[in-house]
Image (tube, grey):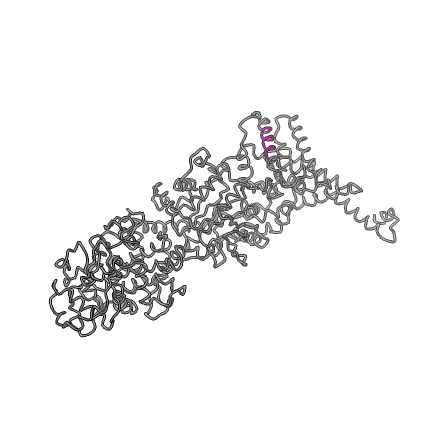
C-alpha cells in the first residue's frame, strides 16, 4: 500500500484532473498551480490604497492585522458564520455552511491549526516579533528573524519554511505558506546600497536585534534577488519564486512530499508543508474547475476524479497508475456516503481526508474518506453500511421464491420458472433510445438516463410487473452481497443495466389483498398536506409484512428504528426506489398519492435519484398525472409470444415430474377456442397449466372460472359485484356490442343491477350508493379483467366476457324452494341462453363471445350449486342438433353455426369433449350417421353418369 503521503498527493492531484481531461492544462505545472492560488485565494493582505505608503513601509516590513480582508477562502476554512468574526467553531453540526472547522473533529482541527504555524519549532521563538513590535498589531514581512541556513553556505539563499513566520493570526487571519503573503512594493534598485556598502556575511552572522533587523532583511532580499536590478518587486513575486522553487517543482513533481527522507527534522516540516498545501490548493483547484467547467459539471467531475484517483510514477500519464481505491471501496464510498452538492464541498472532503491521513487519524485514503463522512453523520455511515448489509441479505432471499405455490405448498424459484418478457419503450423526453430491443428493459433504461431517472412500467394484471421488480431487487442484492449476478442478468439481459448493480433497491408495494385500499386516510382531501417525512412514514406503514421484514430484522424489532432505517434508505444516494402496483391505491386518494410521491422524490432532503413505478392502466386523469410525474417515460410489458409461452409451459411440466407429463400438450390449450389470448398473460398461463397438470380432466369452464379469481386485488368485494358484472357482460354480449362500453352506461347499469340484486335478496333496493370512484376502483382498475381508456370500459379478453356472460345464465339456476320457482328459474335461464344463440345465428351480429359463452355453458360442472344445469345443457344440445338438420336457403347460416358449436364441444375441454349424457350421445350418433349418409348421397349425385337419377343412386348405394 502506498504510504500516507503518496495517498495524500493522489487525492490532491485528483482535484485538477478534470482540467487535464478537458485539455485545459497539459499537466499540473508549478506556475499554473501557483497562479490558481494567487487568483482564487489572493494575498493574505491586499494591496495598500497608497502605493507610496506601501513603499515606505516595505523597509519596516510590517502589516497591520486590521488590513487583513477575509473572503471565500476564510469561509472555506472557518465556516460561513465564523469567517468574519475571526474565531473558529469546532461544532461539526452547528453551521449551515460548514468549513474545515466544522467538518473535522475538534481535536484534529486544533492539531491542524498548530501544524499550519511554525511556532512549535524550538529554533523559533514562540513570539518571534514580540521584542520588535506588538504581536497583536501586525506581522513582520515574511517573518524573517534569523538566517542560520543562509550564513552557512555560499550558495544563493532560499526562503526556508523554518525561517518564515506563517500561520494563523490572532483574529483568525490565514497567513499560510502556500498563500501569497501581501502586496507591499519595493524597487530592486533600492537594494543596490546593500550590494556595495555592507559586509554581507558579517552582517548575517550578527545576532538579530531591533537595530539590525531591517538591514539583515534587506541584505537577504538582495541576495535572494541577485541579478534583478531596476525592477519593481513585491511580496507576491517573492512568494511565487519561493513557491515554485521550494514546493511544487522539487516536492510535488518528484513525489517527495512527505517522503521518509524529508521528515527527519524535529519540526515535521514536510507534514506541515503537505497540510498547508492541502488546505490552499484544494480550494484553489476546485474554484478553477468551477470557473472552467461550470458549477454542476465541476461537482460531478471532481467527485468522479476523486473516486478514480490513482498512484503513479512522476512522469506517468493519467490512467496508467494503480487505483488508489479498489472497486469495493469506491462502491461503498459512492453508495454509503452523502457527498456534498458543490465542488468546494468535494474539495473540503478531500482536504479532511488528507488531514486525517497525515495526522495519523486514518491509515488509508478509503478509511480517511469513510471516517470523515461517518463523523459528520455521527456514526450513521457505518451504521447504514451494517444495516444495508443485513438488509441486502434479506432482499437477496426474495430471488429464491416466486409468488406462487404448487399443490404441495412448495415455492418455485426464478431459476425454475422465470421467462424474461419483452418490453416496449414509448419515446419520452428523458428516455434514451436504442436500436437493440433488449435495451427497452426497464433496468437498462434507468441505468442510461442522465440525471434523475424516472420510469413507469405499465401492464395489465398478471403480466409480471411485480415478478420483474421483485426479482430485480433480489438480483441487485445478490450481486452486492455475494457477487452472484446470475439472477440480475436473467432479468436484464443487457450490459447497459450493469450500473444498477451498485444500487440499493428499495421495493415499496401496497398492502396485501386483505388490507388493500385501507390505511390511506391521511391522503383524503379533508386532511392537511403531508410532509415528505410523513408520506415516507405512510409508505412504510403500508408495506406488506414481507417487505417490512428486512427493516424489522435489522432493527431488532424496534418499530421506530425500522421506520428511520426506511427513511434513511430512501435518502441514500445509491438507492433505486421501486413503487409497485400504484393502481392498488384507492382512486379517491390516488392523485394525491402521486403528488406526494413526486414531491418526495424531488425533496432535496431525499433527492431520490432513481425511481421506478409499476401500474396497471389507470383511468385517464390519474394516468396522465402519473406519466407527468415520471417525466413521460413509459415502458410496457408485452404479452408473451408463442416461444415464451412454450418455454414457460415446458418449465412448468419439468417442475412437476410426479404428474403425467403426457396428460396435456401445449397445443391442446392453444387450440381451445378463446383461450389463445390468455396465454400471453404469464400468470394466467401458469395457473392454467398447473391446474391441468394436477387434473388433466378439468373443464374449460372450471379452469377459467378459477383463473379470473386470481386477478382482483380487493380487500373485500361487494357481495353483488360479481352478479352485477355478469349481468353487464351478458348485456354487452346479447347486444353484440363487443368488449367495450362507455363509462357512463357502465355505471348506470351497475347501479340499476345492484339495486335489483339487493331487492331480489329481500334487502330492498336502497342502501348507500357507491361513488363513481368506488365503482371504477373496485369494478375496473383493481379487478384485473377490465381497463378504461378514453371513457370506455373494456374487457381485456373476449373469453372472460364470455365467462361472465355464462355466469349470468347460470345465476338464474340457483336452487329453488319449490317446483314452481324451479321451473321459473329454468325458463329464465333458457331464455337467456336463447338470446345468446340468436346472436350466434344472426349473420349481422358477429360476436365471438356469444359462441364462447354457449361452449362454456356446455363445459360447466356443478357451477355455484345449481341443480338444473344438466337439463339446460341437454336442451342446448337438442337445439344445436336440430339446427344442424336445417341446412337450406336462408337457414344455411344456422346450420353452419350449429355444426361449428357441436364440433367445438367435442374438443373444448382442452382436447376432451364436453360432458354429454346418454341421450345426447344417441342424438349425436344419429346426426353423424345422417351426415355420413348425406355426404355419400351427395357424392353420388355429382357423378356425371347418374347425376339425374338420385333414386337409382340411393338404391345402388343401399
Q: Is residue 493 above or below residue 85?
A: below
Q: Residue furthest front?
A: 52
Front position in the image: 390 or 813: 390
**Residue 199's spot in the image, x, y percent?**
14, 73
* Left or right, residue 56 beside residue 956: left
Q: Is residue 505 above or below residue 785?
A: below
Q: From the viewer's side, name the closer residue of 635 and 451.
A: 451
Looking at the image, which residue is at 30% across and 52% down?
374
Magenta-drawn segment: 746-756
Expressed as whole percent of the image width and height from the top left, the position of residue 340 reads 35, 52
Q: Nearer the viewer, residue 51 or 254?
A: 51
Where 883 falls versus 350 (above or below)? above
Q: Which quadrant does the N terminus fall into?
A: bottom left
Residue 30 colored in magenta in the image: no
- Asked whether residue 506 appears in the rendered view, the answer is yes
* Count of residue discs: 0
Please say whether residue 487 is visible from this viewpoint.
no
Vertical position of residue 578 compared to residue 865: above or below: below
Judged by its main secondary structure, the magenta piece is helix
Query: Position of 768 compared to 96: left or right?
Result: right
Q: Which quarter of the figure has residue 759?
A: top right
Amino acid at each position: 500500500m502506498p504510504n500516507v503521503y503518496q495517498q495524500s498527493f493522489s487525492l490532491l492531484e485528483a482535484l485538477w484532473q478534470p482540467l487535464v481531461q478537458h485539455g485545459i492544462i497539459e499537466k499540473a505545472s508549478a506556475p499554473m498551480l501557483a497562479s490558481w492560488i494567487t487568483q482564487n485565494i489572493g494575498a493574505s493582505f491586499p494591496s495598500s490604497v497608497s502605493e507610496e505608503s506601501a513603499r515606505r513601509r516595505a523597509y519596516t516590513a510590517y502589516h497591520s492585522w486590521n488590513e487583513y480582508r477575509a473572503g471565500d477562502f476564510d469561509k472555506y476554512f472557518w465556516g460561513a458564520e465564523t469567517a468574519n468574526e475571526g474565531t473558529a467553531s469546532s461544532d461539526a453540526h452547528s453551521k449551515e455552511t460548514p468549513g474545515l472547522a466544522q467538518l473535522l473533529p475538534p481535536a484534529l482541527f486544533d492539531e491542524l491549526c498548530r501544524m499550519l504555524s511554525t511556532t512549535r519549532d524550538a529554533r523559533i521563538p514562540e513570539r518571534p516579533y514580540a521584542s520588535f513590535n506588538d504581536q497583536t498589531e501586525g506581522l513582520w514581512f515574511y517573518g524573517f528573524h534569523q538566517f542560520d541556513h543562509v550564513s552557512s553556505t555560499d550558495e544563493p539563499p532560499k526562503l526556508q519554511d523554518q525561517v518564515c513566520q506563517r500561520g494563523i493570526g490572532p483574529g483568525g487571519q490565514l497567513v499560510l505558506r502556500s498563500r501569497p503573503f501581501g502586496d507591499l512594493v519595493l524597487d530592486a534598485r533600492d537594494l543596490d546600497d546593500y550590494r556595495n556598502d555592507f559586509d554581507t556575511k558579517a552582517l548575517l552572522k550578527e545576532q538579530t536585534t531591533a537595530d539590525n533587523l531591517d538591514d539583515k532583511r534587506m541584505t537577504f532580499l538582495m541576495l535572494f534577488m541577485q541579478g534583478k536590478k531596476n525592477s519593481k518587486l513585491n511580496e507576491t513575486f517573492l512568494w511565487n519564486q519561493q513557491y515554485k522553487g521550494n514546493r511544487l517543482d522539487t516536492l510535488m513533481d518528484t513525489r517527495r512530499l512527505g517522503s521518509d527522507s524529508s521528515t527527519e527534522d524535529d519540526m515535521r516540516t514536510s507534514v506541515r508543508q503537505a497540510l498547508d498545501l492541502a488546505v490552499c490548493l484544494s480550494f484553489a483547484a476546485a474554484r478553477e474547475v468551477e470557473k472552467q467547467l461550470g458549477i454542476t459539471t465541476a461537482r460531478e467531475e471532481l467527485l468522479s476524479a476523486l473516486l478514480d484517483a490513482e498512484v503513479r510514477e512522476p512522469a506517468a500519464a493519467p490512467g496508467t497508475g494503480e487505483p488508489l481505491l479498489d472497486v469495493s471501496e469506491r462502491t461503498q464510498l459512492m453508495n454509503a456516503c452523502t457527498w456534498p452538492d458543490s465542488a468546494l464541498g468535494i474539495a473540503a472532503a478531500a482536504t479532511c481526508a488528507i488531514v486525517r491521513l497525515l495526522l495519523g487519524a486514518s491509515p488509508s485514503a478509503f478509511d480517511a474518506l469513510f471516517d470523515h463522512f461517518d463523523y459528520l453523520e455521527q456514526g450513521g455511515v457505518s451504521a447504514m453500511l451494517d444495516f444495508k448489509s443485513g438488509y441486502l441479505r434479506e432482499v437477496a432471499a426474495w430471488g429464491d421464491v416466486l409468488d406462487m405455490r404448487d399443490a404441495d405448498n412448495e415455492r418455485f424459484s426464478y431459476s425454475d420458472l422465470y421467462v424474461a418478457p419483452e418490453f416496449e419503450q414509448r419515446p419520452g423526453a428523458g428516455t434514451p433510445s436504442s436500436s437493440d430491443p433488449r435495451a427497452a428493459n426497464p433496468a437498462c433504461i434507468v441505468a442510461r438516463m442522465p440525471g434523475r431517472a424516472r420510469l413507469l412500467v405499465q401492464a395489465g394484471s398478471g403480466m409480471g410487473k411485480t415478478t420483474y421488480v421483485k426479482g430485480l431487487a433480489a438480483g441487485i442484492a445478490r450481486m452486492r452481497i455475494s457477487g452472484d449476478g446470475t439472477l440480475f442478468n436473467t432479468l436484464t439481459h443487457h450490459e447497459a443495466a450493469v450500473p444498477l448493480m451498485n444500487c440499493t433497491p428499495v421495493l415499496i408495494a401496497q398492502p396485501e389483498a386483505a388490507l388493500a385500499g385501507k390505511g390511506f386516510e391521511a391522503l383524503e382531501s379533508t386532511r392537511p398536506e403531508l410532509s415528505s417525512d410523513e408520506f415516507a412514514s405512510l409508505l412504510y406503514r403500508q408495506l406488506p409484512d414481507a417487505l417490512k421484514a428486512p427493516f424489522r430484522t435489522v432493527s431488532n424489532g424496534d418499530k421506530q428504528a425500522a421506520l428511520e432505517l426506511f427513511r434513511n434508505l430512501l435518502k441514500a444516494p445509491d438507492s433505486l426506489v421501486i413503487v409497485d402496483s400504484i393502481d392498488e391505491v384507492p382512486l379517491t386518494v390516488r392523485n394525491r398519492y402521486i403528488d406526494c410521491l413526486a414531491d418526495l422524490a424531488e425533496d432535496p432532503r431525499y433527492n431520490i435519484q432513481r425511481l421506478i413505478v409499476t401500474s396497471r392502466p389507470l383511468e385517464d386523469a390519474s394516468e396522465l398525472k402519473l406519466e407527468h410525474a415520471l417525466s413521460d417515460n413509459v415502458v410496457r410489458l408485452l404479452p408473451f409470444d408463442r416461444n415464451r409461452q412454450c418455454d414457460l409451459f415446458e418449465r412448468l411440466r419439468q417442475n412437476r415430474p410426479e404428474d403425467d407429463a403426457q396428460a396435456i400438450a401445449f397445443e391442446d390449450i392453444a387450440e381451445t377456442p378463446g383461450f389463445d389470448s390468455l396465454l400471453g398473460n404469464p400468470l394466467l398461463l401458469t395457473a392454467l397449466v398447473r391446474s391441468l397438470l394436477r387434473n388433466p380432466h378439468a373443464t374449460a369452464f372450471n379452469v377459467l372460472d378459477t383463473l379470473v379469481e386470481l386477478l382482483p386485488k380487493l380487500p373485500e368485494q361487494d357481495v353483488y359485484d360479481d352478479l352485477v358484472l355478469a349481468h353487464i357482460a351478458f348485456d354487452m354480449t346479447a347486444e353484440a356490442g363487443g368488449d367495450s362500453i362507455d363509462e357512463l352506461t357502465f355505471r348506470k347499469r351497475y347501479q340499476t343491477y345492484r339495486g335489483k340484486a339487493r331487492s331480489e335478496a329481500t334487502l330492498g333496493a336502497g342502501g348507500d350508493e357507491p361513488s363513481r370512484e368506488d365503482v371504477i376502483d373496485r369494478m375496473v382498475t383493481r379487478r384485473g379483467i377490465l381497463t378504461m381508456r378514453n371513457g370506455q370500459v373494456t374487457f381485456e379478453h373476449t373469453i372472460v366476457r364470455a365467462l361472465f356472460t355464462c355466469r349470468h345464465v347460470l345465476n338464474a339456476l340457483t336452487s329453488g324452494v319449490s317446483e314452481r320457482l324451479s321451473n321459473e328459474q329454468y325458463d329464465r335461464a333458457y331464455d337467456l341462453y336463447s338470446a345468446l344463440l340468436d346472436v350466434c345465428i344472426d349473420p349481422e351480429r358477429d360476436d365471438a363471445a356469444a359462441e364462447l359463452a354457449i361452449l362454456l355453458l356446455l363445459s360447466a360442472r356443478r357451477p355455484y350449486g345449481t341443480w338444473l344445469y344438466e337439463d339446460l345443457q341437454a336442451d342446448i344440445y337438442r337445439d344445436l342438433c336440430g339446427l344442424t338438420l336445417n341446412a337450406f336457403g336462408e337457414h344455411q347460416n344456422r346450420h353452419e353455426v350449429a355444426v361449428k358449436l357441436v364440433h367445438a364441444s367435442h374438443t373444448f375441454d382442452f382436447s376432451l369433449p364436453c360432458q354429454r349424457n346418454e341421450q345426447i350421445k344417441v342424438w349425436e350418433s344419429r346426426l353423424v350417421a345422417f351426415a355420413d349418409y348425406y355426404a355419400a348421397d351427395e357424392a353420388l349425385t355429382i357423378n356425371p353418369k347418374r347425376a339425374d337419377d338420385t333414386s337409382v343412386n340411393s338404391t345402388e348405394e343401399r
